[in-house]
Image: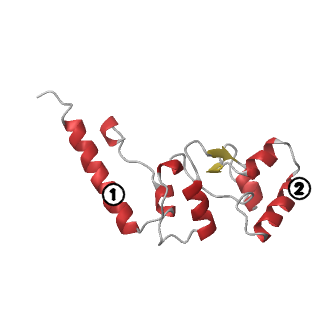
Amino acid sequence: MLTLGADGVVIGTRFLFTHESNYPLVKKEALVKAGLGSTARSTAFDEINRTVGWPTGIDGRGIANEIISDANEGLSLEERLRRADEGKDKGSTSRIPVWAGAGVGLTNKIQSVEEVVRELQEETVRALQRASQLLVH
């Protein structure tokens, strides 16, 4: 992204995959299992999380689990909340919000923050070196 002119990138999800993250282990495991294209943006996550009240048009991105399926089927909020509470009691992530960015499928392991930062730095250096070879001297 930097070689395309971006001033920066958002990589918050990547740090959820760390040992140091306080994200619950069951949610970290759901992130590890997620693939590319496995997220959705929806206000349904906030409805289940009981954190409604965001301005119009503001939603969140998370793993497209049964929260999205239930909302798309037109189930009442009351029924969706009941199902979510039931799933949470069973330790399931199928109906609890698992926040994740669109690139969640690019990572499939839990590492230390130190390892993540080192990898990001090495990848950035390699990308910039490759880009510099494209310049006409």
Residue appearing at x 73%, y 61% in the figure: 49
Asked whether residue 57 appears in the rendered view, the answer is yes
Q: Left or right of 60: which side holds 21?
A: left
In the figure, residue 36 lies in which quadrant?
Answer: top right
Height in image: 59 above or below 5? below
In the figure, residue 111 lies in which quadrant?
Answer: bottom left
> What amino acid does circle 2 point to?
Glu
Asked whether residue 53 appears in the rendered view, the answer is no
> Residue 136 location, x and y as percent?
15, 27
**For marks 1 and 2 on the same chain, the one whose residue lies earlier in the sequence:** 2
**SS at badge 1:** helix
Give the labeled residue for mark 1. 119
> Residue 127 location, x and y as percent?
28, 43
The image shows a total of numbered marks equal to 2
Front of the two marks 1 and 2:
1
Tag 2: Cα neighbours inside 10 Å, few (<14), some, or many (≥20)?
A: few
> Marks 1 and 2, how far apart in space?
44 Å
Residue appearing at x 19%, y 37% in the figure: 132
Looking at this view, name the residue that lies furthest to the top: 136
Q: Left or right of 98: which side holds 78?
A: right
Give the labeled residue for mark 2. 79
Residue appearing at x 71%, y 49% in the figure: 43
Residue appearing at x 89%, y 50% in the figure: 76
